[in-house]
Image (tube, rainbow, N blue to C red):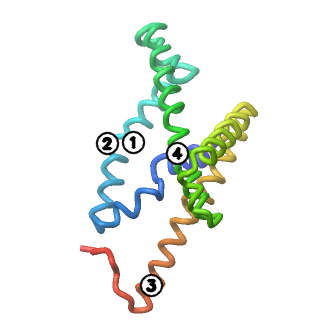
């Protein structure tokens, strides 16, 4: 996995566009909501992971096992796995609801069967992609990040700049 692919996967995970409307109410102060977690969480996590990776081949399980034994190594990797088991269906349910608006049938957003089918198809589709190898997963994740997060973010910025350039008033305080 390249550094760019890893960066894109991190961007997709952290910088979801879903939170931007709520954060818009804070104006420029909302930048702090991105900067502080980056400094306090992402940078130290990256440094720790880089240091551990130079000492032991493997990942979280190996690192925790070497420090605390097999039992806690298993616990660490199980907690990481169970977080994904809970998080993915929640995210995919959001995707299903959003997709219903894209296709012009908002009633589907509250249809449990539709949501379940979308969750199962996307969950198993992503599982099959992952089973094909980390390289394919990284490529799909990177392109998804570009098309689903970065491109819409750039588009929002450009359209916002055009809006302001036409003399319209900003609805968000920039103070």
The tag earlier along the polypeptide, 2 or 3, is: 2
How far apart are labels 1 and 3 at the CA level? Answer: 35 Å
Q: Hey, which quadrant is residue 1 in on the image?
A: top right
Residue corresponding to mark 4: 91
Dot 4: within a 10 Å radius of its alpha carbon, few (fewer than 14), some, or many (20 or more) residues? Answer: few
Q: Is residue 126 left or right of residue 43?
A: right
Residue 167 is situated, as x and y percent measured from the top left of the image, at: 39, 92
Dot 1: within a 10 Å radius of its alpha carbon, few (fewer than 14), some, or many (20 or more) residues? Answer: few
Tell me the residue at 29%/68% (across/down): 27
Q: Considering the numbered disc 1 on the image, is that residue within a helix, a strand or a loop?
A: helix
Residue corresponding to mark 3: 163
How far apart are labels 2 and 4 at the CA level? Answer: 25 Å
Residue 24 is situated, as x and y percent measured from the top left of the image, at: 34, 66
Q: Considering the numbered disc 2 on the image, is that residue within a helix, a strand or a loop?
A: helix
Tell me the residue at 37%/47% (across/down): 38
The tag earlier along the polypeptide, 4 or 1, is: 1
Q: Residue furthest left?
A: 175
Q: Nearer the viewer, mark 4 or mark 1?
A: 4
2 and 1 marks in contact (CB < 8 Å): yes
Query: Residue 40 — which label?
Result: 2
């Amino acid at each position: 996995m390249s550094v760019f692919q890893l960066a894109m996967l991190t961007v997709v995970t952290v910088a979801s566009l879903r939170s931007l409307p709520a954060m818009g109410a804070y104006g420029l102060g909302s930048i702090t909501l991105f900067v502080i977690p980056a400094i306090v969480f992402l940078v130290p996590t990256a440094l720790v992971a880089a240091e551990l990776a130079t000492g032991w081949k493997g990942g979280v399980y190996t690192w925790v096992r070497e420090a605390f034994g097999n039992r806690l190594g298993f616990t660490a990797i199980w907690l990481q796995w169970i977080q994904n088991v809970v998080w993915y269906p929640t995210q995919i349910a959001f995707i299903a609801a959003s997709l219903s608006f894209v296709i012009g049938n908002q009633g589907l957003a509250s249809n449990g069967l539709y949501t379940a089918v979308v969750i199962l198809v996307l969950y198993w589709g992503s599982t099959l992609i992952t089973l094909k190898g980390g390289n394919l997963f990284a490529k799909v994740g990177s392109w998804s990040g570009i098309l689903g997060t970065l491109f819409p973010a750039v588009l929002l910025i450009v359209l916002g700049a055009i809006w302001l350039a036409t003399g319209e008033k900003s609805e968000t305080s920039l103070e």
